[in-house]
Image (spheres, grey):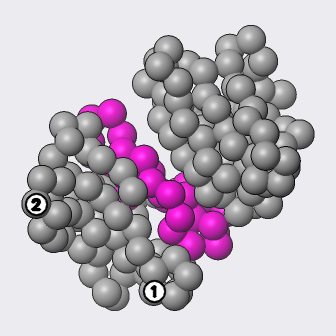
Amino acid sequence: MALSPGGQTLYVASGYFSGTDMLHALDANTLALRSASPSSMSYDSGLAYLAASKDGQCIYATDFAQHCVQLIDSSSLAITSSIPVGQGPLGICRSDLLNALFVCCFGDNSVCMIDLASMAVAGWYTGLTGPMTVVTGPDGVTAYAANAGSDEILVISPLNQPA
């Protein structure tokens, strides 16, 4: 799920395990359905986690099956482009101060950092064991990734730059 920057719209990916991915936009106050991706639109049965862009115009969705981050227009819910990442991307979060996304690549045991200016992977954090989720800390720069395989948290900060 992801919440729009203004807090008015809740975006929900559904159907990951059923093979019928859909993206829904709900009113965050009432949970009433505002819109849903057309049933004819395929998200390749892999949408997992979501993050909203700072301006609310784009939803970033990890696509486990296609090994990428899908960029989805928040108005039409249509995929506009994708950014290749590692195998089996799951958790995703945005760092406004870095103008970047952090993405857990479960299959590669890594976290990649996507530079939003270039829309490309700018670095990798390796040595993890099944990274599942990632959040940005209160400083807006440090990220914390949870390792499912080791029950540990990796701290990603400007002091340990990606390789």
Q: Residue furthest top?
A: 159
Quadrant position of residue 65 = bottom right
Q: Main secondary structure of the magenta part?
A: strand
Out of 71 and 10, give the one closest to the viewer.
Answer: 10
Residue 30 has which mark?
2
Residue 20 has which mark?
1
- Callout 1: few (<14), some (14-19), or many (20+) C-alpha neighbours within 10 Å? some
Name the residue at 65% across, 57% down. Answer: 89
Alpha carbon separation for disc pair 1 and 2:
25 Å
**In the rendered structure, which amino acid carries the disc numbered 1?**
Thr
> Over which residues does the magenta segment extend?
46-72
Residues tagged 1 and 2 counted as in contact (Cβ below 8 A) = no
Picture quarter with the C terminus? top right
Name the residue at 74% across, 11% down. Answer: 159
| x then y, percent, for residue 117 | 49, 30
Q: Is residue 84 visible?
A: no
Q: Nearer the viewer, mark 1 or mark 2?
A: 2
| x then y, percent, for residue 55 | 27, 35
**In the rendered structure, which amino acid carries the disc numbered 2?**
Thr
- Callout 2: few (<14), some (14-19), or many (20+) C-alpha neighbours within 10 Å? few
Decide: is 23 above or below 152. below
Q: Is residue 10 magenta?
A: no
Quadrant position of residue 162 = top right
Q: Is residue 55 magenta?
A: yes
Q: Is residue 27 visible?
A: yes
Out of 34 and 41, give the one closest to the viewer.
Answer: 34
Name the residue at 71% across, 26% down. Answer: 155
Q: Earlier in the sequence, mark 1 or mark 2?
A: 1
| x then y, percent, for residue 160 | 78, 18
